[in-house]
Amino acid sequence: MKQSQMFIPTLKETPADAESASHQFLLRGGYIRQNAAGIYSYLPLGYKIIKKIETIIREEMDRTGAQELLMPAMQPAELWHESGRWDVYGPELMRLKDRHGREFAMGATGEELITSLVRDTLNTYKKLPTTLYQIQTKYRDEKRPRFGLLRGREFIMKDAYSFHAETDTLDDVYWAMYHAYQRVFERCGLKFRAVLADSGAIGGKDTHEFQALAAIGEDTIAYSDGSDYAANLEMAEVIDVPKEKPVGQPLKKIAGNSGTESLAVHWFKTREATLAVFLRAEDEVNDVKVKNYLGADMIEALTDEKLDAVHPLAGVRVLADNALKAIADGVFYNKAEETTYAELDPSRDLPIEAFADFRFIKEGDPSPDGKGTIRFAKGIEIGQIFKLGTKYSEAMGAYFLDDAGKSKPLIMGCYGIGISRTLSAVCEQYHDQNGLIWPKDLAPFTVHLITMNMKNEAQKQLSAELYQSLLEKGYDVLWDDRKERPGVKFADSELIGSPVQLVVGKKADEGIIEISRRSDSERKECAVHNLLEQVN
Ligand code: ATP
Ligand code: MG
Ligand code: MG
Ligand code: MG
């Protein structure tokens, strides 16, 4: 492609509100443009990479036997009423009405839609298991859209759903997806870890996240340096504490119960620390009962410390810079320090007494599986896989007949990859102070051919020949044939970040050009007849 004809609106300056490297360089390199908060256009360069990531994902999904379909982004509200999520999803779900007043959701995810699609068709064990996937734009009215494509309000996601007659095949597909995700992210060149997710609340074995390692990441993961153990420190979503009472609502019921008591997890964010309190679900969130539950001793211990931040919950005063105070039967996780967290033994049925088994993990601890030492790292969640069980099939009446003719709810799994977020995660890992440095398999162009002076006939002529022959050899070449100063061309070339640069300059008439790789600063001369060996 000739650069003079391509739409690559690079920017000299870093846009003021772009805080992360990926956001800055995707904007500056002419890859994306913002249209509204958390809403972006993918310009030709950016869209090329999106398509490359999609191709990798399609190949790996198809390899597992999953079949691609495409469902609408606009979903009828009735389906969300059936699942119960119309009410519980909250303001993140974007909603709209048509001219007849019928309500719709802009798809934040696709469980409702897919369950409604299969409930009349996957109705016998003979048709199971089946896995379907799509690549479709998703909408979430994120409270804080930020870091460009990393947390958008409109973003591209691959979402897959599997349907099963028995848990064995769910297990098989879950692990096939796990390995497919590993291949996808390896092919994207990412340094990442698969981690147990939500390990405290719903049993870490049933869901893994794929976390790209990056300092900007919003998640903190604990991993062992001597084994494969890795877990997300986040056990539940974090919410801000509203000023007025009641101070919060249960975000999540812990699966299982002890006797008649089911449990709920409450997360609250104080000024500097995040505080998690585990309560009985029947409890009102109010002073008396929380005090009852946490126990007088603990409350004493907290107040005795002359704690400096008043937390509205239970009137408990919590030391903001040292929130880890509650042991035994309550759990505090210090988000500010990120040195501790609590983990439930997933094999337990989560009775209240299980709190006694909570472990607090800090960096340097031996690892939970007895191998290696715990390390912490920041991660960007680029994908997540879940065993859903029968939650949606039961709620929405998706039943099949088993081999004995008995009607049973479909067992489900779901598997997501944030495609636009993956693009950003790659940029977080592959850049320097001057721009992006694409891994070979994702680069929008593998070779950037730069003609220093288009007015010089020898340079122009040699460049045209090289361009043609590289294209014929199958290289994806961007030819900077613009009538710009060399400084402008080099700056743009670094921003764009193709793996190889070929510079046609003063020695063009001798058949000599310069070759460099974006990943290092070395430039060397090369005779054009030797070029092909050097480009690879
Ligand atoms: P997060 O914890 O970052 O809010 P999530 O757990 O809510 O993400 P999932 O519901 O698991 O996200 O969705 C599947 C994938 O979609 C995520 O792993 C992530 O890669 C991507 N994703 C989720 N929210 C966004 C967003 N706002 N912008 C871009 N990608 C997103
Ligand atoms: Mg989210
Ligand atoms: Mg998450
Ligand atoms: Mg997730």
Image: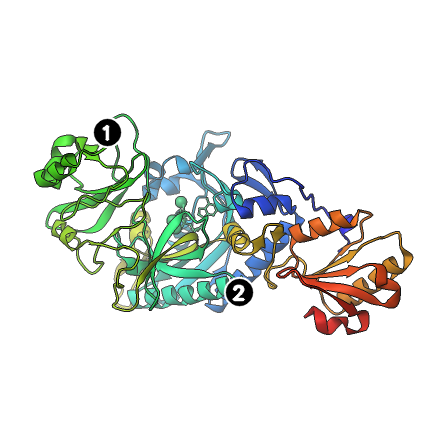
Q: CA distance from mark 2 to mark 1?
A: 48 Å
Q: Callout 2: few (<14), some (14-19), or many (20+) C-alpha neighbours within 10 Å?
A: some
> Which amino acid, by three-letter code, is at mark 1?
Pro
Is disc 1 placed on a helix, strand or loop? loop
Which residue occupies the foreground of this view, 381 or 497? 497
Residue linked to disc 2: 187
Image quadrant where one finds the C terminus: bottom right
Name the foreground residue: 513 vs 350. 513
Query: Which residue is at the front of the view, 390 or 339?
Result: 339
Q: Would residue 261 be found to the left or right of residue 469 on screen?
A: left
Residue 491, image x, y percentages: 70, 49
Element under disc 2: helix
Residue at x-position 76% and y-position 51%: 3
The answer to whether residue 160 is visible is: no
Q: Residues within 10 Å of mark 1 (few under 14, many from 20)?
A: few
User: Of label 2 and label 1, which has the lower sequence position?
Assistant: 2
Mark 1, residue position: 246
User: Residue, x 52% and y 52% (percent of image)?
Assistant: 428
Give me the residue at 57% from left, 35% from top: 16
Is ligand 1 within 8 Å of the beta carbon of the residue shown at mark 2? no
Residue in view at x 65 percent, y 50 percent? 495
Q: Please indicate whether residue 211 sits to the left or right of residue 31 in the image.
A: left
Disc 2 marks which amino acid?
A: Arg
Q: Position of residue 176 (x, y in %)?
A: 41, 67
User: Vertically, is 145 above or below 376?
Assistant: above
* Quarter assignment of residue 95: top left
